[in-house]
């Protein structure tokens, strides 16, 4: 219930900037914030994309009647809310997982050309795009873009696997789904120089660049994409690099991809350790059988300051949250992007 009274809501950005505003009964915190001119990340405005994620740290705030949220039960229990479908039930305060500058990277709509398309595993395509002149944007490693599937009115969201330094080139890793409209286009019609309608960047899942704490990354399938971008950005930044454990998992050996790219990064970045898992055997040399979640913490406890990034299907995210919290990682240091198959 959101009640019938107007409430005061404070939004605290990670750089210490705060704004207080009134939220009307029945209204969402996101709409009130945008009306007040705040740089709040958002995209779908319907509780499905998780771009507007924030953590309730004081007061009460519930999902508005008639709305639904894609958050997992464990995420809600950790105080997370999607501001586009959340109303204030009392005066309350939210912590935003990004600084007050991020929202200034407004999403744009434009075009990109196909540079390359290649199959890198039984069910994964690598798509390289080049932004056209009408489409320039900045993004943070971990964010995603949307592509309109040619010949349809449907859009699909994909995390960017390349870094901002590589713009105007963008690399995507796309899972092939039986009967999926994007999958069919990629397999049947995608060709170099095809123009695509795209928009972005979106999402509140991105590298916490100010943090120097140890990093754990758990990636299921094409959930590897944002991790590649984040690893490359950490590698390029000056100074001592934090220990990073990347735990990457696929269902079977046929689904594995980017082994060489990952091995190269391990060579370039000595603080990076990698565990690769397949759910079922047979497993190639150096690959364990099991899920990528269990592989984290197997060698001992984690540093309590650890910052974790999770990207994959909802079941993996839920299991990883529980596992990491049991290993002592603070809920606020666990950042996740769920893949929901279209
Ligand atoms: S804007 Fe997409 S979940 Fe809120």
Image (spheres, rainbow, N blue to C red):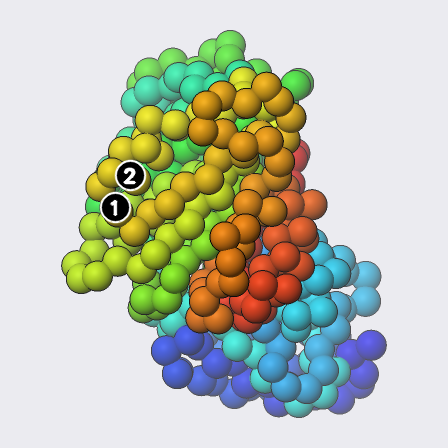
Query: In the picture, which quadrant includes the N terminus?
Result: bottom right
Residue at position x 66%, y 18% in the image:
179
Q: Give coordinates of residue 39: x percent, y percent.
A: 43, 69
Classify 158 as above or below 96: above
Residue on which the image places disc 2: 265
Give me the disc on residue 269: 1
Left of 159 or right of it: where is 235?
left
Q: Is residue 156 left or right of residue 77?
A: left
Mark 1 touches mark 2? (CB < 8 Å): yes
In the orientation shown, which residue stands out farthest toward the top?
A: 188
Left or right: residue 37 versus residue 7 is: left
Residue 61 on image: x %, y %: 71, 77
Q: Secondary structure at mark 1?
A: loop
Foreground residue among 23 and 213:
213
| SS of the residue under disc 2 | helix
Could you tell me which residue is drawn at 30 percent across and 22 percent down? 115
The C terminus: image quadrant: top right
Residue lying furthest front in this view?
Answer: 299
Label 1 Cα crowd, 10 Å radius (few <14 / some 14-19 / many 20+):
some
Which mark is on residue 150?
none
What residue sits 55% from the left and 23% below the top? 283
In percent of the image, x 37 and y 78: which residue is there? 15
Measuring from the top left, give residue 274's x and y in whole percent: 41, 41
Residue 266 in view of the camera = yes
Disc 1 versus disc 2: distance between alpha carbons? 6 Å
Q: Name the spot of residue 316 as percent of width and height, x first.
A: 64, 45
Pointer 1 residue Cβ closer than 8 Å to ligand 1 = no
- Where 67 falls versus 281 (above or below)? below
Residue closer to the observer: 71 or 288: 288
């Amino acid at each position: 219930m959101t009640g019938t009274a107007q409430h005061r809501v404070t939004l605290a950005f990670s750089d210490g900037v705060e704004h207080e505003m009134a939220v009307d009964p029945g209204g969402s915190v996101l709409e009130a914030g945008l009306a007040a001119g705040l740089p709040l990340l958002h995209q779908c405005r319907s509780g499905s994309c998780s771009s507007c994620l924030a953590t309730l740290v004081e007061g009460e705030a519930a999902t508005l009647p008639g709305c639904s949220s894609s958050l997992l039960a464990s995420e809600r229990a950790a105080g997370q809310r999607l501001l586009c479908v959340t109303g204030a039930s009392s005066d309350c305060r939210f912590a935003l997982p990004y600084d007050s500058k991020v929202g200034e990277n407004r999403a744009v709509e434009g075009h990109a050309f196909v540079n390359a398309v290649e199959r890198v595993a039984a069910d994964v395509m690598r798509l390289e795009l080049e932004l056209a002149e009408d489409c320039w944007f900045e993004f943070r490693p971990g964010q995603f873009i949307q592509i309109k599937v040619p010949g349809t009115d449907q859009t699909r969201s994909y995390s960017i696997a390349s870094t901002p330094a590589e713009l105007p080139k963008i690399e995507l890793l796309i899972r092939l789904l039986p009967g999926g409209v994007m999958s069919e286009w990629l397999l049947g019609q995608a060709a170099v120089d095809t123009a695509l309608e795209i928009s972005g960047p979106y999402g509140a899942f991105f590298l916490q660049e100010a943090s120097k704490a140890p990093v754990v990354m758990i990636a299921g399938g094409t959930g590897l994409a944002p991790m590649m971008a984040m690893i490359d950005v950490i590698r390029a930044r000056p100074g001592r690099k934090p220990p990073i454990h990347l735990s990457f998992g696929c269902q079977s050996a046929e689904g594995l991809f980017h082994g060489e790219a990952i091995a190269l990064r391990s060579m370039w970045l000595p603080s990076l350790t990698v565990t690769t898992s397949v759910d079922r055997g047979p497993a190639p040399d150096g690959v364990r059988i099991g899920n990528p979640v269990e592989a984290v913490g197997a060698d001992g406890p984690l540093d309590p300051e650890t910052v974790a990034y999770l990207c994959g299907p909802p079941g993996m995210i839920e299991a990883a949250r529980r596992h990491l919290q049991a290993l002592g990682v603070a809920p606020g240091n666990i950042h996740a992007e769920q893949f929901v198959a279209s």
